Amino acid sequence: MTDAQHNGPGAATAGAAGAVATERGMTRFDRTYDQPDPRAYFRALGPLEYQTPGHAQHVFRRLRRALRTGGRTAEPMTVLDLCCSYGINAALLNHDVTLDDLYARYTSHEAAAMSTAELAEWDREFFAVRRRTDAVRVVGLDIASNAVAYGRAVGLLAAGFAENLESVPPSPELRRAVRQARLITVTGGASFLSARTFRPLLSAAHGPVWVAAFVLRTSPYRAIAECLASFGLATEQAVPTFPQRRFTSAREQRYAVEAVTATGQDPAGKESSGYFHTALHLSRPTSDVVATPLDALVPAV
């Protein structure tokens, strides 16, 4: 699941399919999240300018480069993308495409006329010719089985698992798939995750792992950071915040402003200006924190 989906990539008020207001004042988009292909997802995301994967693309590429230098990891490198949905982060990390390119592609008249099978074939060809020479192996994990299956079918995910580690332990196959993981990424869904997800994954990894999570400012991250600390990872929060998406309603904005204020943060110029914002939390071994300052890894917004 993703914060974008469960906290709103689209809006009922904007005509996005599957949007449902919740008692907490947030908007859910469950029906767009686990479709056979990503077209409904992007149709819902576009009107509210959902942009976290675009911000993450620049950060994750820098993290990949840093991990590959200084002998921090051996080839081949594996990235584990939590709440991976249709493999969007893998598409942006490993291919010469932008998030705007994906919006244009999946909301186009050409895409609308295709069956899911035709779209998948179209995507396989599209991503194959745009794959970067520095591409890495991406393993996807999400509870949405259709989304994971699509990411695998078009070649974005080297392996994908539809498992909910908040409820059950990881399968032996998942444990094997993440043995060589050196980077764990999260661009949405952190508010639905806990140590129950992270602990078995870090236990399965054979070497030091970096964890990079874009977390809504309405949600605490302390419990996860404490779990990561038990594996020797120090968590830092980047100074800039990143706009996530526009609010679907005044009610949702009130919720966000109140939630952020309750945590002691200032919503001025962020949630008060009409957008959810995320904070980047990067967890690394202390030696890596000393060797490479966080500011060198996070581009200016």
Image (spheres, rainbow, N blue to C red):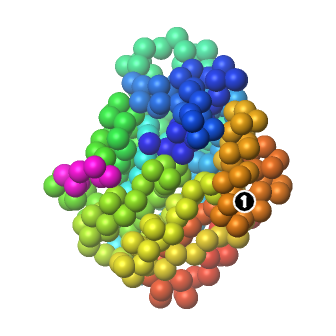
- The reply to whether residue 20 is visible in this rendering is yes
Q: Label 1 crowding class (10 Å Cα cut-off): few <14, some 14-19, many 20+?
A: some
Q: Does the magenta segment cover residue 300? A: no
Query: Amino acid under label 1?
Result: Thr
Locate residue 198, reporting x and y percent.
Answer: 36, 63
Locate residue 129, reporting x and y percent.
Answer: 48, 39
Q: Residue at x 45, y 50 (%)?
A: 192
Q: Is the magenta region chiefly helix, strand or loop? A: loop
Q: Does the magenta segment cover residue 168? A: yes
Total numbered badges shown on the rendered structure? 1
Secondary structure at badge 1 equals helix
Q: Nearer the viewer, residue 206 or 165?
A: 165
| Relative to 76, 233 lies left or right | right
- The reply to whether residue 67 is visible in this rendering is no
Q: Residue at x 34, y 58 (%)?
A: 197
Q: Which part of the image, by quadrant, shows the N terminus?
A: top left
Q: Residue furthest left?
A: 172
**Placement of 118 over or under 33, stated as above or below:** above
**Placement of 136 over or under 145, stated as above or below:** below
| Relative to 205, 270 lies left or right | right
Magenta span: 165-171
Locate residue 20, reporting x and y percent.
Answer: 56, 27
Q: Which part of the image, by quadrant, shows the C terminus?
A: bottom right
Query: What residue is disc 1 on?
Result: 261
Q: Residue at x 39, y 72 (%)?
A: 227
Q: Nearer the viewer, residue 11 or 20?
A: 20
Q: Residue at x 65, y 64 (%)?
A: 263
Locate residue 217, reporting x and y percent.
Answer: 64, 57
**Placement of 223 over or under 139, stated as above or below:** below
Q: Nearer the viewer, residue 209 or 138?
A: 209
Q: Nearer the viewer, residue 281 or 184?
A: 281
